Image: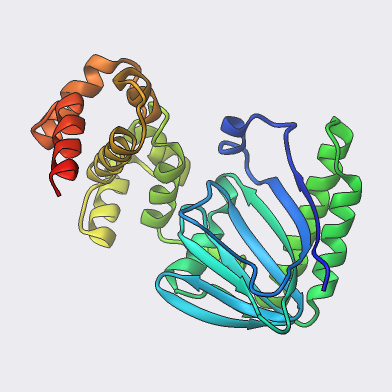
Amino acid sequence: MEHYLKQYTDRFTDFSNKHISDLILYSSGIEQCIPNYSYSLKGREYHLITFVSQGKGTFEIEDKVYDIKANQLFIIPAGYWFKYTADATDPWRYSWIGFLGIKSNFIYQAAERHQFVYDCRDASQYEGMIASILDSSGDTFSSFLKINGLMYSLLGDLTEEIGILNQSTNQQLSTLARHFMDLHYHDPIQMTDVAEFVGVHPNYLANIFKKETNTTPKSYLTNLRIRKAKELLLETSDSVSLISQSVGFTDSLSFSKFFKKETGSSPLHYRKEQAHDSDSL
């Protein structure tokens, strides 16, 4: 069986602006895999829905492996590690759509229910819609509007069929707040920004968030920024100045004071200390 791949990635919109859009297409494509083709990734910055129209394979996420067959779809929320592998004798053909934006957080609702795989009546229907996106793709504003209109139509059909999106109307405030912070921790956001996004007073948000998560939104954002900063310190050679900007600080001095207060070490000392511990193993 021959390998086939056709895909599109939006380059019309700057990636940083995609996060603050309501809902925007990032990528789409169609692929016929060869036997045993496997792919894994620590996590993307956008959500993905994959429709299997032919063949079969396996999909792994959250330490669980799913056997996937034709007329099933699986979702990969942004930031989730995953792996998928085509069958050795009947490798799958699938199509996908990747998207992000503030109103894309309905994907996390499914993830919180640990529901990543769904049946669908006819995956080739969605493949046809994705083929239309590919045919309309380009770097002009008109094509940008067309492909995003097609994406909305696809998600609308998917909503009617399996209801994956309708859960979003009942999201907990803490869920919306966490997802907003997950998307914007690299911006200099404050609790007032988070509260404005979910549509409540900051004090009310703090009370509800504490009740639903057993922590405060401020603590959640602090821990998120510290975790991301540690990853950047250990996994990159970026300067402290660049890392500080990457986790929402306007200057490196404020970031260094914040990091030392939360961890007991300066950013550079933490990097050296962790590198030394790794070398001694």
Q: Nearer the viewer, residue 83 or 142?
A: 83
**With 219 as the anchor, is 172 left or right in this view?**
right
Vertical arrangement, residue 3 with respect to residue 135, above or below: below
Q: Determine the residue located farthest toward the left in the rendered image.
A: 264
**With 226 as the anchor, is 148 left or right in this view?**
right
Q: Specify the quadrant of the image occupied by residue 214.
A: bottom left
Q: What residue is at 46 percent from the left and 53 percent from the top?
A: 79
Rendered location of residue 44, percent (x, y): 53, 50
Rendered location of residue 208, percent (x, y): 29, 55
Q: What residue is at 83 percent from the left and 32 percent from the top?
A: 139
Rendered location of residue 95, percent (x, y): 75, 64
Q: What residue is at 40 percent from the left and 42 percent from the top?
A: 181
Vertical arrangement, residue 236 with respect to residue 102, above or below: above
Rendered location of residue 270, percent (x, y): 16, 32
Q: Nearer the viewer, residue 195 or 156?
A: 156
Vertical arrangement, residue 228 with respect to residue 83, above or below: above
